Amino acid sequence: MEELLKVLGEIRPDVDFVNEQKLIDDGILDSFDIIQVVTELNENFEVEISIDELVPENFNTAQAMWELIQKLQQED
């Protein structure tokens, strides 16, 4: 989780990823941010996030992103 927070902080240092609960729903992350987040997660965690997984529930919180990463790593 710490590595995820570091990656997210490099993309958007102005966002409190630890406490924010509605990154997508509140428009804190826009579509360009999500593209960058997905690219960085794919590279840093050696996962492949598919289009089907690009839903707000997977990206509204850092915890949700972390759970998605863990799920994808287990599927490999």
Image (cartoon, rainbow, N blue to C red):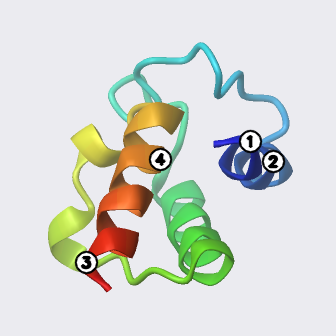
Query: As displayed, is residue 63 above or below residue 65?
Result: above
Tell me the element at label 3.
Answer: helix
Tell me whether circle 2 and circle 1 mark residues in contact (CB < 8 Å): yes
Q: Earlier in the sequence, mark 4 or mark 1?
A: 1
Give the CA separation, mark 4 to mark 1. 10 Å
Name, please, the residue furthest toward the left: 52
Query: As displayed, is residue 7 above or below residue 51?
Result: above
> On the rendered image, what quadrant is the N terminus found in?
top right
Q: Earlier in the sequence, mark 2 or mark 3?
A: 2
Disc 4 residue crowd, few under 14, some 14–19, many 20+, Cα 10 Å: some
Tell me whether circle 2 and circle 4 mark residues in contact (CB < 8 Å): no
Residue that badge 4 annotates: 66
Tell me the element at label 4.
Answer: helix
Q: Earlier in the sequence, mark 3 or mark 4?
A: 4
- Left or right? Give the position of 37 relative to 4: left
User: What x and y, as percent, mark residue 6?
Assistant: 81, 47
Q: Is residue 59 visible?
A: no
User: What x and y, as percent, mark residue 25?
Assistant: 33, 27
Identify the residue shown where x is 45% and y is 80%: 47
- Left or right? Give the position of 28 relative to 57: right
Query: As displayed, is residue 12 above or below residue 53?
Result: above
Q: Earlier in the sequence, mark 2 or mark 4?
A: 2
Disc 3 residue crowd, few under 14, some 14–19, many 20+, Cα 10 Å: few
- Give the numbered dot on residue 6: 2
Q: Nearer the viewer, mark 2 or mark 3?
A: 3
